[in-house]
Image: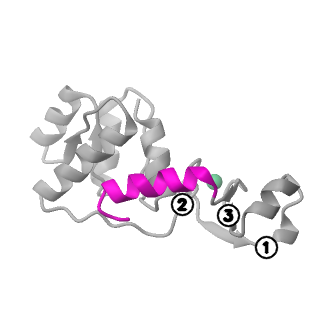
Amino acid sequence: MLGSLARKLRALGFDAAYYKSGDDAGLLERSVLESRIILTADRSLAARAEAMGVKAMLVVGDSDRERVGSIAGWASASGIVLMRGDPLCSLCGGELRSVGKDDLSEVPPAVRRRHRLFFRCNSCGQLYWRGSHWKKLMSVARRLGQG
Ligand SMILES: [Zn+2]
């Protein structure tokens, strides 16, 4: 349910894992093992995590913008500092490296002319550039106090 939020958070450089399966026990176990905070829209899961001493946050809002706002509010109320690293691949969470324009045969020439910075995922090979979606991401970052 929060898959697109997880992709945005990764693109911003947060180590956000997305857990698809409905196996709450598995999710709770993994959160403990990897010292993760659970972001969920599921009230009963959040309560269950809390009862187990696992940090969990109930994400509210109808859009990713609102959801990000709710994360920022919760973090500051809980005294949690959100640590953002270098942008990660939004598909797989892999590290991105910048690539030169010579390495971009699959990019349409118009895009190559318009943009300067291109990045490729070390894990899955996905190519990124800082286009209009980057500006949207930065507005998400500002909502998290990370702009
Ligand atoms: Zn990737």
Camera-nearest residue between 90 and 32: 90
Q: Is residue 34 visible?
A: no
Q: Which residues are magenta?
A: 131-147
Where is mark 3, residue-wise?
Answer: 122
Mark in front: 1 vs 3: 1
Disc 1 from disc 3: Cα separation: 15 Å
Q: Which residue is mark 1?
A: 100
Q: Give the residue pinned by disc 2.
A: 88
Near mark 1 (Cα within 10 A), the count class, few <14, some 14-19 or many ≥20, is few
Q: Secondary structure at mark 3?
A: loop
Is the C terminus in the top left, top right, bottom left or bottom right quadrant? bottom left
Kindly report the distance in space between the C-alpha atoms of the residues bearing marks 2 and 1.
Answer: 18 Å
In x, y percent, where is residue 93? 54, 55
Q: Are marks 1 and 3 in contact (CB under 8 Å)?
A: no
Q: Amino acid at mark 2?
A: Leu
Whether residue 89 is situated above or below residue 54 in the rendered picture: below
Residue at image coords 39%, 58%: 141
Secondary structure at numbered mark 2: loop
